[in-house]
Image (spheres, helix red, strand yellow):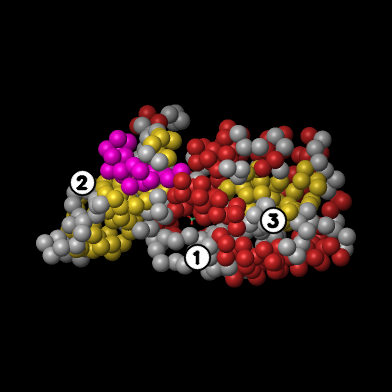
Amino acid sequence: MHDFNYKHNDLYCESVSVEELARKYGTPLYVYSRNTLISHYRKIKEAFSPINPLICFSMKANSNMAICKVLVKEGSGLDIVSGGELYKAFKIGVSPRKIVYAGVGKRDIEIEIAMRHHIFFFNVESIPELELINKVAGKLGIRQKVAIRINPDIKARTHQYITTGHGENKFGVDFETARKIFLGKQKYKNLNISGVHMHIGSQIVDAEPFIRAMERIVNFIKDLETHGVSIRWLNIGGGLGIIYSNEKPQTAKEYAKAILPIIKKTKANIIMEPGRFIVGNAGMLVTRVLYIKETPSKNFAIVDAAMNDLVRPSLYGAYHEILPVKSHSYSNSKEIKDFDVVGPICESGDFLGKNRKFIDLKEGDLLSVMGAGAYGFSMSSNYNSRPRVAEVMIEGSKARLIRRRETYEDLIRTEA
Ligand code: LLP
């Protein structure tokens, strides 16, 4: 995270002072480092360069067009999960040949539009969906490439809401069902069922569950080959964990070293769908302290950002480091106190951090919630009729507004 640094006592993003950004654009404010974004993308690209995979950035992590454009310019494709993401992907200008489309509940209209634009792959999650895609392809006279998403029944140690490759999860199909689909694939006349897809969960910090899942998938592919079915594409999903506090996640290089020998056993071309690894630590949420409230049992720093702006702490109990934008060096005259950092929303679950130590924290101070680039803005809402916040991207000493702050008029724009 070398692009978020203190210079003397002031927090900077690249060469821009965060205090100045707050003054110019207001708070709460998402701030992204373009340099971090690019360097994390390149880390994956370089680690996997021996096999030159198609990297499709997972848009759900952050679908801001400016962010996606930076990655697309670097050569990235996009992993989408909805008609809305498809629409944005076209506006971003990514080649349709670099779009892969996952999700358990694709609607017929979404399928049709994606197909009319010749996206690369549908990652199919059930037999009824396969049948629908086959039907739509027939109607359009297209032979569509699809991958079958396999649920390898692996438990990855991560939050229960973000594990996806265990038998109890709604995602993908089991090996037996997948086998039946591949062995009977001529039945789907309009489909070229030539890929296997997996994604076992998110924020996975060690390679072991990936290794187990991939070994199972590769054995499955080898077995299909003995039956004359060849798999041309293997999509290994995303899921790489990042550092929020004291995690020690595998690096892109370690991940590649662990899994390359396994995936090289197949002749398949590789697709990857990283989200968080690329954008997570490229963004932070800047917020201002509105009040300091001291009660007999707790101290609260009530800030202007809330769970509607960053829901991860409330929803997953996720930890995000919170840094003062002006740091105080420790001296005896300064007081260190514990605070719960909470927002203005009318719910006790509205917090950004609990029991955080700050020196001499006072009203008007700025705080930065770190690691907020992935699943931060993209999961934000208008709860409590709060306008969604602005986003800026920093490139060296330049700041660019990449989303204007919503106004009160925006709040009622779509209402009767
Ligand atoms: N591919 C598929 C099919 C996915 O479902 C996901 C994420 C990804 C790729 C990207 O995963 P990543 O590399 O970012 O781990 N809101 C949660 C995370 C949900 C992840 C959903 N799927 C959070 O804030 O932790």
Q: Quadrant of ligand 1?
A: bottom right
Q: Quadrant of the N terminus?
A: bottom left
Q: Which residues are magenta?
A: 12-34
Q: Residue at x 87, y 63 (%)?
A: 227
Viewer can see residue 346: no
| Neighbour tally class for label 3: few under 14, some 14-19, many 20 plus, Cα within 10 Å | some
User: Can you identify the residue that label 2 sits on?
Assistant: 364
User: Can you identify the residue that label 1 sits on?
Assistant: 249
Residue type at tag 2: Gly
Tell whether position 109 is magenta. no
Q: Residue at x 40, y 31 (%)?
A: 410
Residue 394 placed where, x, y %?
A: 41, 41
The alpha-carbon separation of the residues under discs 3 and 2 comes to: 51 Å
Left or right, 30 with reference to 261: left
Name the foreground residue: 153 vs 89: 89
Compare marks 1 and 3 and give the one earlier in the sequence: 3
Disc marking residue 51: 3
Q: Residue at x 46, y 49 (%)?
A: 36
Q: Is residue 344 above or below residue 255?
A: above
The alpha-carbon separation of the residues under discs 2 and 1 comes to: 35 Å
- For label 3, the SS is loop
Residue 287 placed where, x, y %?
A: 30, 47
